[in-house]
Image (tube, rainbow, N blue to C red):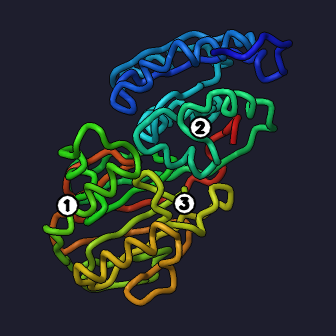
Amino acid sequence: MTSAPFPPAPSAQRRYAVVLNPHAGRGLASREWPRLEGELQARRFDFELISAGSGDDALARVQALPADVAVLAVGGDGTVGALLPALIGNGARPLAIVPLGSGNDYAGMLGLKAGQFGEALDRLSYTPRRVDALEATVTEGAGAGVPRLLLNGLGMGFDAQVAATMLRAPARLTGFGRYLWGALAALRDLQLTDLTLSVDGQTVYSGPSCLAAVMNGTRYGGGFLISPQSDAHDGKLNALASGPVTRPQLLGLMGRVLRGTHLGQPRVYHATGQAVTIRWAAPTHLHLDGDLSGEVREIQVRVLAGAVTLLNG
């Protein structure tokens, strides 16, 4: 049921490209589009729909639009991440987020919930804010040499293994439940590999580890507060790694991560800065904004301060 028509707010007078990933949330975005369309029409938004099944297709179609068209991204973190090359740089178009993916972690940090279209669109009356982004470059391993832009963050080791395991999760599970299923399953295959985590040229930790993360947002995996101190407006990234842990210790650590109380605990190493290098002694699984990206041995990440104009943050 759509809202009753009302005079458009100044934000509704923008031109928008509504970028819909029909596969987001395992088809939820496509099924929910008629309801979102009704909300947009009730608010008299000037918009056109771009329904694209791949990030590359969506990006190409957005880049071909006139410069004054803003982006309304409908989907999860991966949908937003795929569009970032069109949202960063001179003359970049502004972004608004309508979460409808599986994790929606960056939107969740903003207090936006999947399916609450009215809230997401009402926030377009807010004053636009500049938020940070990340640029990640694999220097050894899959995809080496090609910079990737991220809005939320990346995970390596156990967390990326969880993302891979989630592909086998029962179809009825979504969001946090799907992540938790993958995490418990991945515990069986827990391995420690030597890692060196450096922030702004200083070694934060070197030794056996099972996971590392570099974050602009606070959470991943549908609600795990992996980086509770992150602030997407402070011009800094947050990096962390585990030390050596057993399966029971990692399970306890996961419980703390869920509540965001793990920083400062033994076997948790954390720092903030502008640039990070993570090097593993063996190829290790990587995910970028929740999307699996193969196995790598070394990655470098830098913060892009205030790189994105967010309309409903």
Q: Amino acid at mark 2?
A: Gly
Q: Residues within 10 Å of mark 3 (few under 14, many from 20)?
A: many
Instruction: Tell us which disc is closer to us: 2 or 1.
Output: 1
User: Where residue 59 sits: x, y (%)?
Assistant: 44, 25
How far apart marks 2 and 1 lie (CA) works out to: 41 Å
Q: Name the residue carrying label 1.
A: 185
Q: Quadrant of the C terminus?
A: top right
Whether residue 102 can be seen here:
yes
The residue at 40%/46% (across/down) is: 175
- Which corner quadrant of the image does residue 280 belong to? bottom left
Label whose residue precedes the other's in the sequence (1 or 3): 1
How far apart marks 3 and 2 lie (CA) works out to: 24 Å
The residue at 34%/21% (across/down) is: 53
Whether residue 59 can be seen here:
no
Q: Name the residue carrying label 3.
A: 218
The residue nearer to you, when weighing 146 against 237, is 237
* Vertical side of 122 occupied by 174: above or below: below
Label whose residue precedes the other's in the sequence (2 or 1): 2
The residue at 59%/37% (across/down) is: 89
The disc label shown at residue 282, or none:
none
Q: Secondary structure at mark 3?
A: loop
Label whose residue precedes the other's in the sequence (3 or 2): 2
The residue at 16%/64% (across/down) is: 283
Q: Name the residue carrying label 2.
A: 89
- Which corner quadrant of the image does residue 9 belong to? top right
For this view, does 273 lie left or right of residue 189? right
Q: Are marks 2 and 1 in contact (CB under 8 Å)?
A: no
Q: Quadrant of the N terminus?
A: top right
Instruction: Tell us which disc is closer to us: 1 or 3.
Output: 1
Q: Amino acid at mark 1?
A: Ala
- Which corner quadrant of the image does residue 126 belong to? top right
Total labels: the figure holds: 3
